[in-house]
């Protein structure tokens, strides 16, 4: 069985990929809010894919709908909100 945190990670990766080419070189996004309904189990060995669609931009705040599928259909749906930040300033704040 595929654990919910793993499904969530796939959905977050889909949001990052959805805007990756649209950001400035010094920008990145960080997660702010997540709502995910894991609605069906996934059997061992199934291929899983996640999709993200940007539905709203409010300043630096980006909201996406996300969905995940396995070989048998839909397994999760939700919304992910991310914030665009300056990469270096963010890393300085977290001490890396």
Image (tube, grey):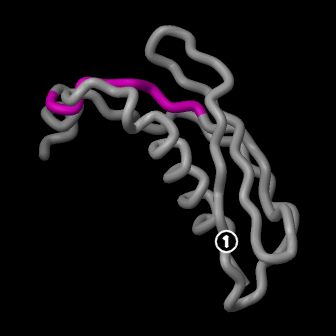
Instruction: Please identify the quarter of the rendering in which residue 75 is found.
Output: bottom right
Residue occupying image coordinates x 60% and y 53%? 11
Q: Is residue 93 left or right of residue 77?
A: left
Residue 83 image offset from top left, x and y in percent: 44, 26
Dot 1 alpha-carbon crowd within 10 angstroms: few under 14, some 14 to 19, many 20 or more = some
Residue occupying image coordinates x 13% and y 46%? 96
Residue 55 falls inside the magenta stretch: no
Residue 5 image offset from top left, x and y in percent: 60, 65
Residue 84 image offset from top left, x and y in percent: 39, 24
Q: Is residue 20 left or right of residue 87?
A: right
Can you say which quadrant of the picture contains the N terminus? bottom right
Tag 1 residue: 48
Residue occupying image coordinates x 62% and y 38%? 80
Q: Give the range drawn in magenta.
A: 81-88
Residue 19 image offset from top left, x and y in percent: 46, 34
Front-most of residues 36 and 67: 67
- Tell me the element at label 1: loop
Q: Is the magenta stretch mostly helix, strand or loop?
A: strand
Residue occupying image coordinates x 70% and y 90%? 44
Instruction: Please identify the quarter of the rendering in which residue 47 is found.
Output: bottom right
């Amino acid at each position: 069985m595929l654990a919910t945190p793993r499904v969530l990670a796939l959905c977050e990766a889909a949001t990052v990929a959805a805007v990756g080419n649209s950001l400035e070189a010094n920008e990145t996004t960080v997660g702010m809010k997540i709502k995910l309904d894991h609605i069906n189990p996934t059997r061992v060995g199934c291929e899983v894919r996640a999709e993200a669609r940007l539905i709203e931009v409010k300043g630096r705040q980006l909201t996406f709908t996300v969905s995940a599928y396995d070989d048998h259909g839909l397994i999760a749906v939700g919304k992910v909100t991310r914030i665009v930040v300056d990469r270096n300033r963010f890393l300085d704040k977290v001490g890396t």
